[in-house]
Amino acid sequence: MLAVVKKPRIEIRAKHIPAPLVRFLKDTYKPENVAVCKNEDSIPFEESDWFKNLDSTPGEMIVANRDLRNWSQVTLAEKLGIQVQNLCAMENGRRAVSRKMAVKLGEIFGTDPAAFFDFSK
């Protein structure tokens, strides 16, 4: 099974997730921010309807993808070939994610680059 909370980023993977734990997550973080699926129902996290409907900023998407891989900012900055300060600014919304950077992030994370680009700007 897999249980995921959007904010703060929490992911629990186990053969069985007790119902009291799921109730606690939903009570604490709001039901719409908690997704639970059984292994036989599993699809890639990024392809789930729940994930697609999240209203997250590009910076939040960078943090979520980085956290899924247990990478530090230093590790990701090195992979991107940028300074940690620039990555920190993108994650915190102080610096826009360019299309070129969104493509790089998509390649590194193996995800759709659109997740890292704010089309409203």
Image: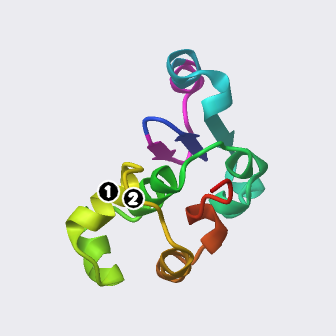
Q: Earlier in the sequence, mark 1 or mark 2?
A: 1
Residue sitting farthest toward the top: 27
Residue found at x 51% / y 72%:
98
Residue type marked 2: Arg
Q: Specify start and end residues of the magenta stretch as a single range.
A: 9-23
From the top left corner, tell me how far across and down residue 13 is, in percent: 50, 49
Residue found at x 45% / y 54%:
59
Queried whether the magenta region covers residue 13, the answer comes back as yes
Tell me, yes or no, if residue 67 can be seen here.
no
Question: Which residue is labeled 2 in the image?
Answer: 95
Residue type marked 1: Ala
Mark 1 residue element: helix
The circle drawn on residue 7 is none
Q: Quadrant of residue 69?
A: bottom left
Queried whether the magenta region covers residue 37, the answer comes back as no
Residue found at x 54% / y 39%:
6
From the top left corner, tell me how far across and down residue 104 is, in percent: 49, 82
